[in-house]
Amino acid sequence: MPLVTTTEMFKKAYEGGYAIGAFNVNNMEIVQGITEAAKEEKAPLILQVSAGARKYANHTYLMKLVEAAIEETNLPIALHLDHGDSFELCKSCIDGGFTSVMIDGSHLPFEENIKLTKQVVDYAHDHGVVVEGELGRLAGIEDDVNVSAEDATYTDPDEVEEFVQRTGVDSLAIAIGTSHGAFKFKGEAKLRFDILEEIGKRLPEFPIVLHGASSVPQEYVEMINKYGGQMPGAKGVPEDMLRKAASMAVCKINIDSDLRLAMTSSVRKFIAENPEAFDPRQYLGPAREAIKEIVRHKIVNVLGCNNTI
């Protein structure tokens, strides 16, 4: 099975009241853990790559890892660029085999965001690739994305119809209170479901995307702290809120920080308990299993996309 776009995935997700997981990948073990969980749970997948991951792992290596995952699992997998910040980066990924790209012009004025997004859409659609745009800005830090709380803004429902119509985007990332990274909230997260509901009315049956949606499981934070880490006050989005969003207009939920936390806590624990270990396979094997278990949990209990293929 070749790589697929998200078009059919999102149509089924909208009709079925669930969301597709978009999991960030950086290396072989992460790809394996994610795809093994999805195969066992019969779930479609979006594997997404940030600009930072592409620099770290190399475009060609990532492509071959994803191709191997498709061959091993026979899953419908879309390969997506996360937070593309320029036409040139999006074009490079499109030309290099990605089936989906995000152009993030959310830091630009509205008209400039439209202009940049439409430029990417025109090129992508000519090559059979789908495009995700963004309106509103999430606070937090993740790879090259760094937005202060003061600069964060909710998505304005009054702008979404014009943006979608003038750009031709296939999906839209919105800001309703989620945040990038593990250090998210001083108190409990409060997602603006009123904004999401209003956007759903303005854009009926149109796929909406949530970024910054990791829940930051406290068992991982506690394990990291126990074995030498320093993560005081790390909090995420409660999973019941994410499940509610998935039952509404949200068809894609991005998950990255939880994967990092699962992997790092596993590695820290193994090395602390086995100080003589020097073979990377000894600690990367359990780390891969930790990735697999958190992805399985997300697919079944948060996204609700298990048994949908």
Image (tube, rainbow, N blue to C red):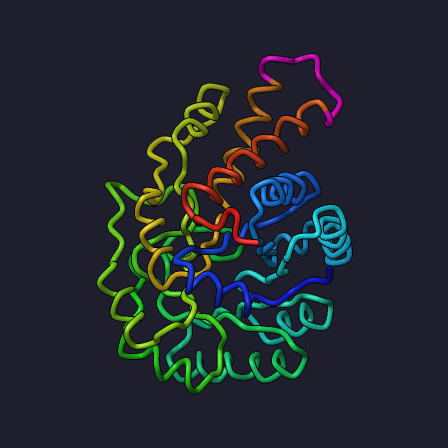
The picture quadrant where one finds residue 128 is bottom right
Residue drawn at point x = 71 percent, y = 42 percent: 28
Residue drawn at point x = 58 percent, y = 84 percent: 122
Q: Is residue 158 above or below residue 283?
A: below
Q: Quadrant of the C terminus?
A: bottom right
In the displayed image of the protein, which residue is found farthest to the bottom? 166
Numbered range of the magenta stretch = 272-281
Q: Which sits in the foreground, 203 or 119?
A: 203
Q: Position of residue 281 (x, y in %)?
A: 73, 27
Residue drawn at point x = 47 percent, y = 38 percent: 297
Q: Is residue 155 above or below residue 113?
A: above
* Image-based side of 245 in relation to 258, left or right: left
Q: Which sits in the foreground, 60 or 1?
A: 1
Q: Which sits in the foreground, 65 or 197?
A: 197
Q: Position of residue 172 (x, y in %)?
A: 43, 70
Q: Is residue 292 above or below residue 150?
A: above
**Magenta includes 20?**
no
Magenta part, dominant SS: loop
